[in-house]
Amino acid sequence: MTNKSSKRARAAHRGIAAAAALSALLVLSACQGAAPAATVDRVDPSGPPPAADLTVWTDAVRQSGFEAYQELYGEDGTDLSIETLPDQFPQKILLATKADKGWPDVVFDGGTNNVNLFSSELYDFAADLTPLLPEGTADEFYEGAISPCVVDGKLYCLRNDYAPNLLWYNTELFDEFGYTVPSTFEEYLELGLTLAEEHPGYSVGAIGGDQGNFFLGSSQCNYGQVVDEEFSIDLTSPECTRAIDFLDQLLAVGAVSPEGEFAPGYTADVGTAGKVLMMVGPTWYGEYLFKGTYQVADGVMGVADPLIWEGDDRAYNQTYGGGVYYVSKHAENPTAAAALALWMATSEDFQVAGPTFPAYQPAATAWLARIKSTGAIATEDIEAVIDAAGKAVDGDQQAALNIPSTIDRGWSSQVVPVITAGDPISSVVDSWQQFIENSAQAAGF
């Protein structure tokens, strides 16, 4: 499930600070930190960045980009100390704030869950990028990608990659079985039930991981969100019950698995066996799931527009993944640090060659052209489909659902054991909602 937002000074005053010192994931505080003390210059992308020594925390995938930046601007005075992202790194940032030293200048974070933590008074870490970046920078990103980076009108991160969901389908199986690619969730359900009857053992999804969120979120189900600083949840609303009933019907006939899409059993029995008819999933499924894990040949999997629920005015698409760059408000040279984050998030030299769909729209256009040229995806208008999927993401909803990981655990702890035992999701709605409410209260809401 996805995740975000926070409650302000009231949470801190209730003693959240003490708990957060032990576990950053149990805190959500959106008290805004003070603005940088000194006036800083905006990044000028037309020339080399200011000379600076910068400490970077990153994962292995992004490390090559930072190394390329060092090679590009090393002679201009850029000196990067590139370190592997530490385990439990939010806690380490909190400890640095308490010690008043030891912050990295730039951090790559694999998700958006920490935006409100790092922008809060308690963590006092993330710089507001608004005065540092060229005006209009945020407008060049997909709106659904950049929205989770914005807190109280201030931009606290830059999105590296974007993972809007698509309908992935096996073109060879559709031809063999004589099926028509669905355009609505109701058609998806009908086809899944037909598949279970006509071709037992074939699959249209695996929801033991995060796929359940794709259907709940697209149905506009409020499974835990923050709007105007207030937390709410209602798993009994029509938007939730239609998605829960949808999944229960597919689970009952075995068309959807209670395992996760990367689970060894599902991978062996369904994925690599070539029995996935279709799946709702993000842009990176093509490279990592179907090709890398299920070993599906190039040109077999196609993509179609995000599904819409009958009666809705449009598709309310979801995302699954997409990391961000933070700049420390304690950086000695914030302009240099922001220049580095901006290059990583927008440079076609780095973004276009990467495996994930760029959040920066100009780079995304070039990335799509490269993917199409490989022939990996069997869809002629792949550029239009993926671009439309990115624009169909509801930015406000994505931001509202960006809640702490402690709340997100409701699915794995409450729902997955139940569906694994063969019972429906509907049987656990009350305890599932109570768990999330209790987790939200523990996190300071």
Image (tube, helix red, strand yellow):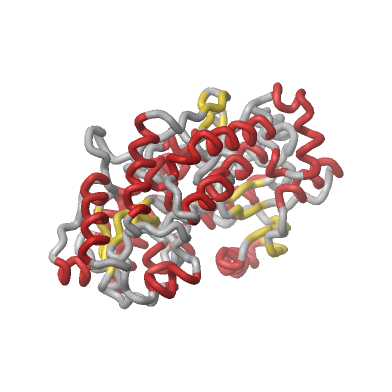
Answer with left or right where residue 57 lies relative to residue 351: right
In-front residue for pair 203/310: 203
Quadrant that contains the C terminus:
top right
**Left or right side of 409 for 179:** left
Using the image as rendered, state which of residue 364 and residue 14 is in the foreground: 14
Q: Position of residue 89 (x, y in %)?
A: 71, 53
Q: Position of residue 407 (x, y in %)?
A: 59, 40
The answer to whether any part of residue 162 appears in the image is no
In the depicted structure, whether residue 236 falls above or below residue 117: above
Question: Which residue is nearer to you in this view: 155 or 50?
Answer: 155
Judging depth in this view, the residue of 334 and 179 nearest the camera is: 179
Q: Position of residue 296 (x, y in %)?
A: 34, 75
In the figure, is residue 421 to the left or right of 361?
Answer: right
Q: Position of residue 83 (x, y in %)?
A: 71, 64
Q: Quadrant of residue 394?
A: top left
Instruction: Please determine whether, in this image, residue 407 is positioned above or below residue 286.
Output: above
Residue at 64 percent across and 67 percent down: it is 75
Specify whether residue 38 is in view: yes
Q: Residue at x 54, y 38 (%)?
A: 432
Number of labels in the image equals 0
Residue lying at 13% horizontally and 65% vertically, measured from the top left: 178
